[in-house]
Amino acid sequence: MSPILDPALVLARLSTLPVEVHGSGDLVLASGTMTGKLLILRDGAVEVVRDGLRLAEVSEPGAVFGEMAALLDRPHTADVRTLEPSTFYVADGQTFLRVPAAALYVAVILAGRLDLVNRYLIEARSQLNPAERGGILDQMIDNIAEALRFGPPM
């Protein structure tokens, strides 16, 4: 976590939010739905799946789910399913993101993800041999890099 935010302090502030408890295997956010919810993991573990591909397994307290849907006012883009009994703080996404400290918290998380994607792109590009330049993988890397440079179309 960024030194801008103290994770213990953030989690203490979140303790005033309502809590949802889910059993193992529960679908807590479904791709294509608009719940308006932003979930913050208090304890447990989840998997994030998009188009049948597992993107992540997350068990870090304070992890946020539903932020992209809330920020972009779009449906959720992935399924979030519990891997074990899990507890979440629940907030209305639009309301939560209007609180400066909450918005900063989500911004730090998103910046961390973006930094990781940038590092993976650099690593992927460095692994291509000259014969692969201009091929489909090189084009995909260019497309991702372009999207990261200018953001998604609105």
Image (cartoon, helix red, strand yellow):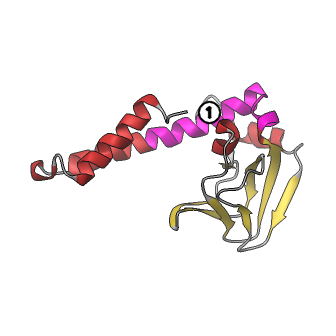
- Residue 23 appears in which quarter of the rendering? bottom right
**In this view, which residue lies farthest toward the left?**
131
In this picture, residue 93 sits left or right of residue 1: right
Q: Residue at x 71, y 55 (%)?
A: 33
Q: Residue at x 52, y 68 (%)?
A: 52
Report the quarter where the N terminus lies: top right
Report the quarter where the C terminus lies: top right
Q: In x, y percent, where is residue 20?
A: 85, 58
Q: Is residue 144 above or below residue 59?
A: above
Q: Nearer the viewer, residue 151 or 25?
A: 151
| Majority secondary structure of magenta residues | helix
- Residue 110 appears in which quarter of the rendering? top right
- The magenta span reads 94-116
Q: Is residue 56 above or below residue 116?
A: below
Q: In x, y percent, where is residue 40?
A: 74, 49
* Magenta residue check for 101: yes
Q: Is residue 77 above or below residue 84?
A: above
State the residue position of label 1.
107
Callout 1: few (<14), some (14-19), or many (20+) C-alpha neighbours within 10 Å?
Answer: some
Q: Nearer the viewer, residue 8 or 102?
A: 102
Q: Is residue 123 something that shows in the picture? A: no
Q: Nearer the viewer, residue 12 or 90?
A: 90
In this picture, residue 77 sits left or right of residue 125: right
Instruction: Find numbered disc 1 in the image and state the secondary structure of the residue it sits on.
Output: helix
Q: Mark 1 belongs to which amino acid?
A: Ala
In this picture, residue 52 sits left or right of residue 98: left
Q: In x, y percent, where is residue 67?
A: 67, 43
Q: In x, y percent, where is residue 50?
A: 55, 60
Q: Is residue 154 something that shows in the picture? A: yes
Q: Is residue 138 above or below residue 32?
A: above
